[in-house]
Amino acid sequence: MLITTDGVVLKERAQGENDKFIDVLTGNMGIISICAKGARKLNSKNAGSTQLFSYSKLCFSQRSNRYYLNSSEIISSFFNISTDLESLALASYFSELLRYSVPSGAPAENVLKLFLNTMYFLDSGKRSRAFLKSLFEFRLLCEIGLMPGLIGCCECYEFRSNSMFFDILNGRLYCDHCFTGEVGFDTVRISDSELHVLRYIALTDFDKLFNFKTSEALEKSVGEVTEKYVLTHFDRNFNTLSYYKSLLT
Ligand SMILES: [Zn+2]
């Protein structure tokens, strides 16, 4: 039986002399691993479409729980990302987050949509890397079921107060009257504008999601919160994130 689906290559692993396995994010099957025989030969018809970050239409068959690529057609290669070291490092971080958090076999339509949109803006350079990093980190966690309660204070439902406190670990907001904890790594004070950006990223429809503008300072402070949100909830570090950050210093 042949299966046809669109997907983005998140990782390539060499196999033997000419073959490779590719991990692909798809909308209907989550992340799947496909064996692409002969795809590492320069003249292979599947060479381009199975390259890292290629978005391709893939036609494959299933034999004893393995998928084997039959034919493929490239939809977009996101070429500019592969020629820019920082963009490539950031896309690799996104890929590691996806491979860590998206299961195989379950539909991931919204996650694929989020990733493709983010890659489009990273490739075109129409949004800054800092903006795209925060947006992808935070929205990804919301899409996989880790949306925090951002509507208001979790105790008195106050929508805004002079300053709010965000308990990152438990995903709760407190107003300054109700907050009794301490500010630390996973509990931060957030301003009205930071909260506004977080609400926007978490709750806006995809067709408007990338439309908002922020200042560089706001990008930076929101970025600190979204990164902490990822590291706290996944409870681990990501080598690709450390590498990306090493390029910025
Ligand atoms: Zn309150």
Image (cartoon, helix red, strand yellow):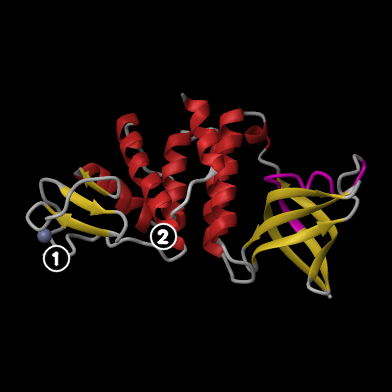
Residue 104 against residue 189 in the figure, above or below: below
- Check disc 2 and give the amino acid type: Cys
Q: Secondary structure at mark 2?
A: helix
Please name the residue that numbered disc 2 is placed on. 142
Using the image as rendered, state which of residue 7 and residue 52 is in the foreground: 52
- Return the x and y of residue 167 as percentages of the image width and height: 25, 55
- Return the x and y of residue 169 as percentages of the image width and height: 32, 57
Q: How many marks?
A: 2
Ligand 1 contact, mark 1 (Cβ < 8 Å): yes
Using the image as rendered, state which of residue 224 and residue 213 is in the foreground: 224
The magenta stretch spans residue 49: yes
The magenta stretch spans residue 102: no
User: Which residue is farthest top?
Assistant: 249
Q: Secondary structure at mark 1?
A: loop
Please name the residue that numbered disc 1 is placed on. 155
- Check disc 1 and give the amino acid type: Glu
Kindly check if marks 1 and 2 are in contact, taking CB atoms under 8 A apart as contact.
no
Using the image as rendered, state which of residue 165 and residue 200 is in the foreground: 165
Closer to the chain start, of discs 1 and 2, is 2
Residue 50 against residue 158 in the figure, above or below: above
Give the CA distance from mark 1 to mark 2. 22 Å
Q: Is residue 127 left or right of residue 204?
A: right
Query: In this rendering, does residue 190 appear at all?
Result: yes
Quarter assignment of residue 27: bottom right
- Return the x and y of residue 70 as percentages of the image width and height: 87, 61
Numbered range of the magenta stretch: 43-57
Image point (46%, 24%), residue name: 249
- Name the image quarter holding the N terminus: bottom right
Query: In this rendering, does residue 127 appear at all?
Result: no
- Return the x and y of residue 38 as percentages of the image width and height: 91, 50
Ligand 1 contact, mark 2 (Cβ < 8 Å): no
